[in-house]
Image: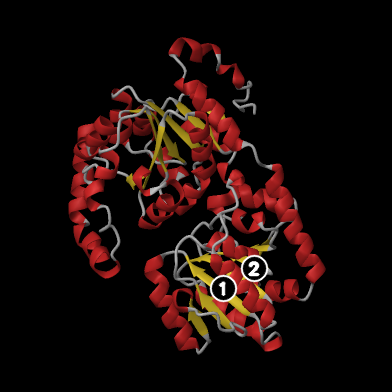
Amino acid sequence: MYLLYSALLAAGLLVTLPYWLLQMSRHGKYRAGLGERLGRVPQRLARQPFRPTIWVHAVSVGEVLAVSGLVAELRQRYRDHRIVVSTTTDTGQKLARSRFGEENVFYFPMDFAFAIRPYLRVLRPELIVVAETEFWPNFMRLANASGTRLAVVNARISDRSWPRYRRFRFLLGKVLQAVDLFLTQTEEDARRLRDIGAAAERVHIAGNLKFDVPVPPTPSIVASLRAMLRECEAGPVIVCGSTVDDEEPVLLRAFENILASHPRAVMILAPRHPERFVQVAQLLESLGIRFWRRSLWSGNSLAGGVLLIDTIGELAALYALADIAFIGGSLVPRGGHNILEPAQHGVPIVVGNYTENFRDIVGLFQSRNAIRVATQAELPLVFMELISNPAGRAELGRRAAETLRLQTGATQRTVNALHELLLPVHASASSRSGADAGGHLTP
């Protein structure tokens, strides 16, 4: 099976090679870290004295943020261990390097034995922790064969992935046998994992690590913007984060409506993907809307205009400035993005009606009246309603912060479960009583 998989993967890469080359030439994507992806272990990893190692894999920015608290807890508990972090995307890599130190971060190898084996040989990890659902067959097989314990944490099976996984569960079941422990976000995720072949006794519910993400350090831009907003009496401020194709035109039309009655309003607009910064800037120009690129902003007034965030890693802190936060990927069928960053700041949150990637979180916030959901047609009216009702807006933000606070604890449950996994086998069996009959882990 694995030989056939590797052959199909190689053939797929060969067929799609023109696409990857185009992405490299036009946007610079995938060029960074190419050697690392192909199995060349960077010297910053290889030259360090050997220590017992825990390898954490986080695909992109969202996963890096989710495991930040987990990495901090692992470093605290396993002081004699080295904690290394791999990512797949360039944006995830930049954020991980800033959070965990460049010497501890690298690009995840492609799922070929020749690319994976050098990392297993150099790092010799005692434990590999994979965030969410990155089921790479060769990687899991080789990690298991090397004697490394393997855990999937914060696991979820999205509505979009679920039908595909079910179609191939006769193959996935064999792949998932390599995993020693699954810690899921919800009971539904646990049920779906068991259904596609994960051993029931290895699946437990630990909660969502994203509820435990610490508030990021505040970059200097936040203080500069806050001072400018105060001095220029600018506002209200609408922060639109992680926006995707076809969302910016809708949001900017809504902003033009706001300007008609609030001419000193400000929009802070942060596209999800860096390669779209130029495209969004061109859209703003074509619409005749005053805007400034964050990388070039020099402190001048933003009243009546848009600040285009063309930098990485600052959005989470910028939500603190918002009177209203809109979370992108949700006005069009892209599944939505993380709503918890604005909730940390007690900011009222608005999303579109496509939020299946975060169905449980959004559902929880809806059940507590802690979020507003709007279609494209409804969005301008929802913005105006919130702007005209400061007390209602403040209450919506307060409920969002309270909902977030009540869901914390997944990080500690996850660390405790990983600790059991690292115990000798004879001790591990007797310690599994930390899970109740429903598979829920106790704090």
Q: Taking the image as drawn, is residue 351 in sight? A: no
Q: Is mark 2 on a helix, strand or loop?
A: helix
When the figure is inspected, residue 391 is found, relative to residue 183, above or below; the finding is below
Q: What element carries label 1?
A: strand
Q: Do the residues labelled 1 and 2 touch (CB within 8 Å)?
A: yes
Q: Name the residue under label 1.
A: 268
Return the x and y of residue 385 as percentages of the image width and height: 74, 74
Q: Name the kind of residue labelled 2 in the image.
A: Leu
> Residue furthest toward the right?
391
Q: Mark 2 points at which residue?
A: 321
Quarter of the image holding residue 43?
Answer: top left
Return the x and y of residue 366 as percentages of the image width and height: 70, 54
Q: In screen coordinates, is 372 left or right of 115?
A: right
Return the x and y of residue 36 as percentages of the image width and height: 25, 47
Q: Name the kind of residue labelled 1 in the image.
A: Ile
Residue at 47% across, 41% down: 132
